[in-house]
Amino acid sequence: VQLQASGGGLVQAGGSLTLSCAASGFINVMDWHRQAPGKQRELVASITRGGNKNYADFVKGRFTISRDNAKNMVYLQMNDLKLEDTAVYYCHTSLYGIDQWGAGTLVTVSS
């Protein structure tokens, strides 16, 4: 399965963005990860096909992950963005034990 993330951009602190990830086929668990400059990639949120969600503590209450199984799409609604949310955001899934990563989309939060 191929993943394509989109929706990144430049936004002021306190603003909102919605990221989208299009999958070329069936997906089960989908994650959003991010990698800030000079930092390790970290898990942001995950969602199962049945809609069970998990969030990293640093985005709880601000980000919402959702999906449309009919369209093989996963979304990340990001509200109240902070400077520290600046990163490249990647969608990820695991298929037959093999990690599948999208190309990433850059989110830049300015003051």
Image: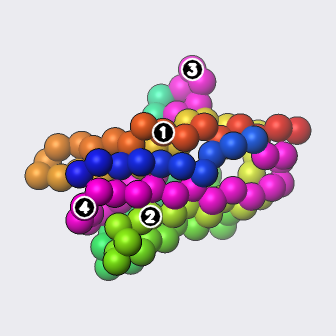
Question: Which residue is the extreme one toward the right?
Answer: 111
Tag 2, which secondary structure?
Answer: strand
Q: Callout 1, which amino acid?
A: Gly
Decide whether residue 56 is among the magenta residues. no
Tag 4, which secondary structure?
Answer: loop
For the point 69% across and 56% down, the residue is: 17
Task: Give the residue pinned by disc 4.
Answer: 25
Q: Which mark is residue 55?
A: none
Task: Give the residue pinned by disc 3.
Answer: 38
Q: Nearer the viewer, mark 1 or mark 3?
A: 1
Location of the C terminus by quadrant is top right
Q: Which mark is residue 104?
A: 1
Is 11 left, or right, of 29 in this rendering?
Answer: right
The image shows residue 23, relative to residue 86, as above or below, that is below
Mark 1 vs 2, N-terminal side:
2
Q: Callout 2, which amino acid?
A: Val
Q: CA distance from mark 2 to mark 3?
A: 27 Å
Residue 11 in percent (x, y) is at 78, 46
Q: Callout 4, which amino acid?
A: Gly
Q: CA distance from mark 1 to mark 4?
A: 18 Å
Mark 2 vs 3, N-terminal side:
3
Q: Callout 3, which amino acid?
A: Gly
Q: CA distance from mark 1 to mark 2?
A: 14 Å
Task: Give the residue pinned by disc 2.
Answer: 74
The image shows residue 78, relative to residue 98, as above or below, that is below
- In the image, which residues are magenta? 11-39
Is 65 left, or right, of 37 in this rendering?
Answer: left
- Label 3 neighbour load within 10 Å: few <14, some 14-19, many 20+: few
- Count of labels shown? 4
Tag 3, which secondary structure?
Answer: loop
Q: CA distance from mark 2 to mark 4?
A: 12 Å
